[in-house]
Amino acid sequence: MHDHKTLAAALVEARLTGAPVRAITPADLDTAYAAQAHVGRALRWFDGVPRHWKSGGASRTALQTHAPLPPAGVWASPAQAGTWPFHWRGIEAEVALRLGQDVSAESAATLDLGSARALVDAMAVSIEIVDSRWVEGQQAPPLARLADLQSHGALVLGAWVPFDAQRDWSQQRCTVAIGLASPQVFTGTHAMADPAFVLPAWLRHATRDGDTLPAGTVVTTGTWCGLPLAAPGELVQVVFDGIGQARVQL
């Protein structure tokens, strides 16, 4: 087990050289989050509070984890990945949510799901491209993946539309097309049955040091399609019926 500075040094090296390194296991959850923050400071990703995040978990009862996303890797759809440095390209079709008002640590502490939903003003289709700075990729230990921004590579955001707090997510249809493969259709397959379920835990995490998240801050909320892989040169297209679409050329 290692401290956050050792972890962060390895992750910074991997990002600066473009070469994955052997996974290092954090001592605990707090160490993994401290490594995230240390890498962000070392690479000067954020001017103030991060404005884009990812949050999620395997189920409503599983541990929910979070990561701030480097702004240079957040792209508007339709996007061109160009020479962005990917080691591999896992695809997650997601719904992103946007805060319509500032959220302080004090207000975040009291939130339940209903009051957290009321803070959201818009939603968008998103594509997260999953990657890893660890040689082991998704076989790296879970806390090592968490330290590596939950294996984040890049995020593509579709057009924003008004958030529907009463939406029946169990009937939500999502279509994912990767390259020339037949499109895959998923219905009601979000791990938590509702993308907004991540909000209370995420908001408490993101404000835990006393920060206030400004209106306009975005969180992407977990995959509907598992983690299919894409290849360099492929076009990825995601459609959520009644919400919109996003696309990225790899």
Image: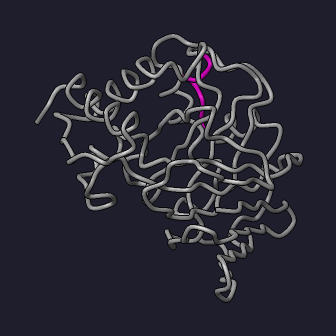
**Image coords of residue 72 (percent x, y):** 63, 34
**Image coords of residue 32 (percent x, y):** 30, 33
Q: Which corner quadrant holds the C terminus?
A: bottom right
Quadrant of the rendered structure where residue 95 is? bottom right
- Which of the pair 83/46 is nearer the observer? 83
- Which of the pair 133/98 is nearer the observer? 133
Q: Is residue 211 left or right of residue 157?
A: left
Q: Is residue 68 left or right of residue 32?
A: right
When the figure is inspected, residue 42 is found, relative to residue 65, above or below; the finding is above
Which residue does the image show at 49% across and 54% down from the upper left? 86
- Which of the pair 66/237 is nearer the observer? 237
Segment colored magenta? 107-112
Main SS of the magenta part reads loop
Q: Which corner quadrant holds the N terminus?
A: top left
**Image coords of residue 129 (percent x, y):** 56, 56
Q: Is residue 160 left or right of residue 56?
A: right
In reply to whether residue 73 is colored magenta, the answer given is: no
Which residue does the image show at 72% across and 72% down from the upper left? 174
Number of marks in the rendered image: 0
**Image coords of residue 127 (percent x, y):** 65, 57
Quadrant of the rendered structure where residue 70 is? top right
Which residue does the image show at 25% across and 55% down from the upper left? 140
Point out the residue furthest to the bottom here. 182
Colouring method of the image: one colour
When the figure is inspected, residue 188 is found, relative to residue 210, above or below; the finding is below
Which residue does the image show at 39% across and 25% down from the upper left? 39
